């Protein structure tokens, strides 16, 4: 393992680029061996990419909202974009794992693959992956070992990327075999709306500069605003607030976070403005909304969260 962690990171960095397969464009954001150092936890967060984690040794705990799952050696989890989650690590028993991060977008032309469907839409079904810890039956371990071996022996970047694509296809097949799991692809949106959505989901600053967004799309501020309003029925600023309020609502499920912390993590610099906007959107102040959710949860029997098993 130490040899892999020493020799492979430069290879991983070279792989992290875009590849197109039929109508799917996959952007490899990051490929890393997890090294937590002295950290005991990773705070609640979400991101705009998919994240796949396979535990090679040890164990860790991952929280999805208010549900926690213990993930051990030979187990894995997949986090779709926008999913609020956090991690905690056991001191004295650190885990080691491999982590892939990627984003998917569809090319302008839809191309059917040998199975008679859009490859991009098939991969995007992973947006509906059910949170939890899953036990590998050995198939993923074999694919990962092949990936490590070929990376060590100097295979081309394309060959290594195709091995990763094979892993994504395998995850799609697993998802289809999960009992009670309904797969559905995302609704195809106007290209301009999709670009704005990606920008807004990535945006981290407290103050939105629509002028910079328009410039990045090679459009004037006025034209972008009019087009977006025409296509969606709302302004870009309203959409930004909606995304942040949705994130805040998810963070409300974490009792350890104070309201001020939730506002900050959701992107609101002014706590009073956040409270007014939240009440207007959901009909209750942040404090009352949290009390209502806690009361509702107290009256509903909760299943034990021990992770899901694959068939």
Image: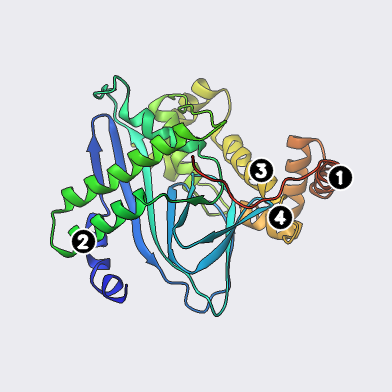
Q: Distance between the residues labelled 4 and 1?
A: 14 Å
Nearer mark to the viewer, of 3 and 2: 2
Residue 221 in view (yes/no)? no
Horizontal placement of 291 versus 204: left or right? right
User: Mark 4 or 3 closer to N-term?
Assistant: 3
* Residue identifier under label 2: 149
Q: Distance between the residues labelled 3 and 2?
A: 45 Å
User: Mark 3 or 2 closer to N-term?
Assistant: 2
The residue at the point 54 percent across, 32 percent down is 181
Nearer mark to the viewer, of 1 and 3: 1
Nearer mark to the viewer, of 4 and 3: 4
The residue at the point 49 percent across, 29 percent down is 183
Residues marked 4 and 2 touching at CB (< 8 Å) = no
* Residue identifier under label 1: 295
Nearer mark to the viewer, of 2 and 1: 2
**SS at mark 1 in the image:** helix
The residue at the point 56 percent across, 51 percent down is 207
Residue 87 vertical position relative to residue 128 in the rendered view, above or below: below
User: Mark 1 or 3 closer to N-term?
Assistant: 3
Circle 1 residues within 10 Å: few <14, some 14–19, many ≥20: few
Circle 4 residues within 10 Å: few <14, some 14–19, many ≥20: some
User: Mark 2 or 1 closer to N-term?
Assistant: 2
**SS at mark 3 in the image:** helix
* Residue identifier under label 4: 254
Q: Nearer the viewer, residue 42 or 53?
A: 53
* Residue identifier under label 3: 245
Which corner quadrant of the image does residue 30 belong to?
A: bottom left
Residue 212 in view (yes/no)? yes
**SS at mark 4 in the image:** loop
Circle 2 residues within 10 Å: few <14, some 14–19, many ≥20: few
Residues marked 4 and 1 touching at CB (< 8 Å) = no
């Amino acid at each position: 393992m130490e040899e892999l962690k020493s020799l492979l990171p430069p290879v991983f960095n070279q792989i992290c680029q875009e590849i197109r397969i039929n109508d799917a464009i996959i952007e490899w954001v990051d490929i890393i061996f997890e090294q937590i150092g002295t950290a005991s936890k990773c705070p609640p967060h979400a991101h705009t990419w998919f994240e796949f984690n396979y535990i090679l040794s040890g164990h860790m705990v991952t929280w999805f909202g208010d549900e926690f799952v213990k993930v051990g050696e030979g187990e894995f989890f997949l986090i779709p974009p926008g999913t609020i989650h956090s991690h905690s690590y056991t001191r004295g028993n650190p885990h080691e794992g491999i982590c892939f991060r990627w984003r998917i977008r569809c090319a302008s032309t839809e191309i059917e693959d040998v199975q008679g469907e859009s490859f991009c839409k098939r991969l995007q079904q992973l947006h509906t992956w059910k949170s939890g810890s899953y036990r590998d039956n050995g198939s993923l371990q074999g694919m990962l070992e092949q990936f490590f071996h070929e990376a060590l022996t100097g295979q081309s970047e394309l060959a290594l990327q195709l091995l990763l694509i094979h892993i994504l296809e395998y995850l799609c097949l697993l998802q289809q075999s999960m009992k009670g799991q309904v797969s559905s692809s995302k609704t195809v949106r106007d290209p301009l709306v999709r670009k704005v959505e990606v920008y807004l989901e990535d945006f981290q600053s407290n103050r939105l500069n629509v002028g910079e967004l328009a410039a990045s799309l090679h459009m004037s501020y006025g034209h972008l605003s009019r087009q977006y309003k025409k296509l969606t029925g709302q302004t870009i600023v309203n959409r930004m607030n909606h995304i942040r309020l949705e994130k805040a609502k998810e963070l409300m499920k974490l009792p350890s976070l104070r309201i001020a912390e939730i506002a900050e993590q959701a992107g609101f610099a002014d706590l009073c403005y956040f409270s007014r906007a939240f009440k207007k959107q959901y009909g209750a102040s942040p404090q009352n909304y949290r009390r209502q959710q806690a009361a509702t949860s107290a009256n509903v029997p909760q299943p034990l969260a021990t992770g899901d098993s694959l068939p």
